[in-house]
Amino acid sequence: MDSPARTLALRTATLLVVANIIGTGIFTATGLLLSAVGSTWIVLLLWGLGGLVALAGALCYAELSTAIPQNGADATLLGRMYHPSLGFVAAVVSLVVGFAGPVASAGLALEEYLLPLLLTSIPPKLIGFLVIVSLTALHARDVSGAAKAQDALTLPKIVVLVLMGILLVAYGSTSHVGANDPKQAADALGQAGIGGAFILVAYAYSGWNGAAYVAGEVKDPVRNLPRALVLGTLVVTGIYLLLNVGFLLAAPFETLAGRKDIGAAAAEAAFGPTGRVVVSVVIGLGYISAIGAWIMAGPRVYAATAAPLPRLSWLARRNVRGAPANAVWFQTVLTLVLFFASGLASLLTFMGILLSLSSALTVLGLIVLRVREPGLARPYRVPLYPFTPLLAGGVLLWMVVLALTEDSMAALWCGATVTTGVALYLLVRGGAGSAQDRSSGETLS
């Protein structure tokens, strides 16, 4: 099957990383962090460390994606570094947990923020349905047009977030930071709950591998993929730090601690009721941009995974404009099932554990690939090897272990999902299975 054309520019790949990362975590996590650690200074430190770990992960994906510049991210890379069955399981996890579930959840949440701003009554779920279907039709039709639309959705979000952060900093008061903290920074840093608090930050940064999903369609991948992954992660880190400084300057500790809507609380404290409306609009824009990014990225995973499997080859087909139309609509059908059965979509949130495990294995697989394929061309090499992959992979694995030990039911569901993925792999691989397994360690052209 022919490889997809390389039509995506550096800007699109970078903005895909940004849109893939920025969700509602930035508008919710800090209030919970303040309550958990008791120090504004440590909260800012945690956001900075989260950006550092995300950057380490992005650097690892930069090496892997330039060495193996193909679509699919974790699914493609895990299949190459370990075994095709693991890559297939990663694709199944991506379909349900990484893309269809989040798109359904975002479509539902979108209405919560935008409906109160509308002057007329609209049937429930209509806004989310129209956004999902419209973006699906766009991405299923044309790669170039969809990329331009995604850029247009993400750029305004970045501008608005930066302006919001600047205004919060300008109108805030430095007396709100540190003065009323219930704990000294040193005491807060040494407490047992600091690990759980960092998990909230790490999840807010998840998605820094966004450009790797479309690595096979990025122009000049050796040059542009590392730039997109690193630049996108740095942009998000800068925005997150700016917004958090603004939040903490806008109101005193006791006003913000424990608030799940800290973005709205801080904006209201600084600008009155208008601030809360502005935050609702910003979050709504963020959801639409994220939905577009997930609809763009997800189908590339299934198309890349299905290409060598005759029984699933229909998912890999592209239309005359280069779009993986079958894979795009396949994802959206599942999305709409979850969207209209919203209770089922909410059950999938805990399975984000599997996404972290997938990313951890991919990052640590960089070490595996260097050992197994020392002669593989690596146009970009991660700095500070092996510390960088050990840092990113180790933190992700630590998050997974901590989450699984705290929720035995989640562990059971994760085990069932992996087992189902392996069973499906054995079912669909057909005659291509043995050849695919034998080639898992060979260099792919």
Image (cartoon, grey):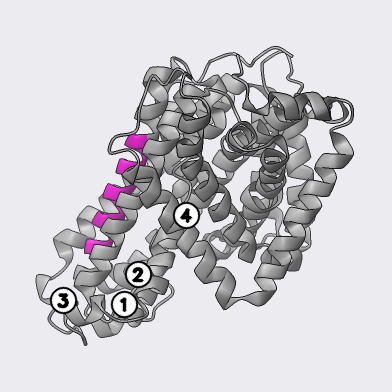
Whether residue 155 can be seen here = no
Q: Which residue is mark 4?
A: 23
11 or 109, which is in the foreground? 11
Q: Nearer the viewer, mark 4 or mark 1?
A: 1
Percent coordinates x, y for residue 54 in the rendering: 37, 48
Residue shown at 74%/57% (left/top)?
417
Q: Main secondary structure of the magenta part?
A: helix
Residue shown at 66%/17% (left/top)?
322
- Which mark, by number, is residue 176? 3
Q: Residue 242: within the magenta?
A: yes
Is 156 rendered above or below residue 24?
above
* Left/right of residue 11 with respect to residue 99 in the rendered view: left
The quadrant where residue 305 appears: top right
Is 357 rendered above or below residue 248?
above
420 or 259, which is in the foreground? 420
Element under label 1? helix
Lower sequence index among marks 1 and 3: 1
Q: Which residue is mark 1?
A: 34
